[in-house]
Amino acid sequence: MRRLLLLPLLTLPALAQSALSPLKDHPLLKQAEAYLLAARKSLEAQAAPLALNVQGNYLRYGYTCEPEAVCTSLPESAQSLTLALVLTPFPFGEVADGVERAQIALRRAELAYRKTRAGLEAQAVAAYGRYQEARLGVRIAEKGLELAQKALEAARKRQANPKELREAELALEEAQNRLEEAQRGLALALEAARDLVDPEAPLPPIPEPKGTTPLSLEEARLNLLEAQIALEAAQRNLLPTLQGSYTRYPSGNDTLSLSLSSKTLQPTLAYTRQNPAQAATALPGGGRYRATEELRLSLSLTLSPGLFAALEAAQAQARGAEEAFLAASRQARLQEESLKAGLLGARSALALAQSRKASAEKALEEAKKRLALGLESPLGVLQAELNLLQAELGLLQAENDLRNRLMELYQFYGELLEVNP
């Protein structure tokens, strides 16, 4: 019989004191951790090697006797206590199905944890990037306001015409509005990052993911395994069941028994103590006898249209799961290619943004040299500084886009960031 072979659970990295440390207390992550623990405990319960059963019975009798004096010799009540030990030397049949389903449930819980945490990490990285962009946007707005103020002062000093003064005043008002809007955007970005990320702490490194099996493919594989388990169970239901037991009666009060069924191959050892003792059986011609041991074998077979219909349903379910797995494989391959193409585009955009920033730095350096030579106005230097800040914003946006593309791949594979304690 096929046995479910699942890879050991991945070692899930802990969230250390970094920008992502607030995630460890996120309700969704706590929920996923609780479900993972529940699934692990369920597997332990299914795979337990033994179980102890205790059963007590009490009976009270009422009689009608002829002659009535006979009733005085009969017991008024009876008690019994049974201790049974069920052993599982190895999972087989229905027991194996239960263990395999518990393993699948544990694997699903582990995948759900990875999916939840990878999604939260992606949200946290994106929120971190938006906050950094918003903070730089405030600096740009402040520099723009400074430039507008200097331009208005210069216009007044050179006694510009009324139209130029109005335009300079309008530009100053617009710069003030942009600064207020940038400050509101920064507050909103900080609020959005709350419970996800510490925007003042450094982000952990985000290398390219290792490229393990995609989450969607893992989930489809588990569905296929579950369908195969159901198919095997439906096939076993058409087989005869053999049951055997051996019972020994050391005395009229004590019973020892060993039983076994072909459905589970779980031996059951039981001891029963009863009071009053079992009386010996009287023979009509005189004499008595009492059984000291008993060996019993039974074979049963159940056939019905419902069982054959259930088998056909399980076969159809298995075929559907196989087709779903193939479709998930194709879809995962296409999605992987699309995400990797987006990553290449983000890297190209980052290289271009780096070149633009280098060009803006050189332009600012040249403007300062011209200012020292009297060939450039202070407004020109301010404009070059503003251009550099805008280039830095473009570079930051390109870096954030690259990180977001990487995090999309992390989500696709269900990989987690390696956070060192």
Image (cartoon, rainbow, N blue to C red):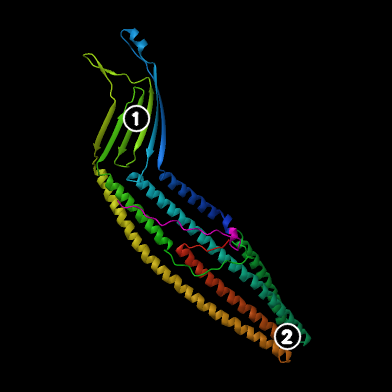
Q: Is residue 193 left or right of residue 34?
A: right
Q: Residue at x 33, y 21 (%)?
A: 278
With 294 as the anchor, is 23 left or right in this view? right
Front-lying residue, 24 or 188: 24
N-terminal label among 1 and 2: 1
Percent from the top left, x then y, of residue 389? 64, 78
| Residue 376 makes an appearance in the image | no
What is the magenta range?
1-22
Name which residue type carries label 1.
Leu
Q: Residue at x 63, y 67 (%)?
A: 185
> Is 177 placed above or below 418 here?
below
- Residue depicted at x 63% and y 61%: 191
| Of residues 231 and 69, the one drawn nearer to the viewer in this rendering | 69
Picture coordinates of residue 250, whole percent (x, y): 33, 25
Q: Amino acid at mark 2?
A: Pro
Q: Which of these two is toward me, 244 or 254?
A: 254
Main SS class of the magenta portion in the image: loop
Q: Nearer the viewer, mark 1 or mark 2?
A: 1
The reply to whether residue 335 is in sight is yes
Q: Is residue 7 magenta?
A: yes
Residue 282 image position (x, y, % from top left): 26, 16
Q: Where does the image place residue 261, in percent across and percent down from the top left?
A: 30, 39
Q: Which residue is mark 1?
A: 256
Magenta-span inclusion, residue 346: no
Q: Which residue is mark 2?
A: 378
In the picture as drawn, the residue positioned furthest to the front comes out as: 250
Could you say whether the residue bearing mark 1 is in a helix, strand or loop? Answer: strand
Q: Are marks 1 and 2 in contact (CB under 8 Å)?
A: no
Task: Answer above or below: position of 106 versus 242.
Answer: below
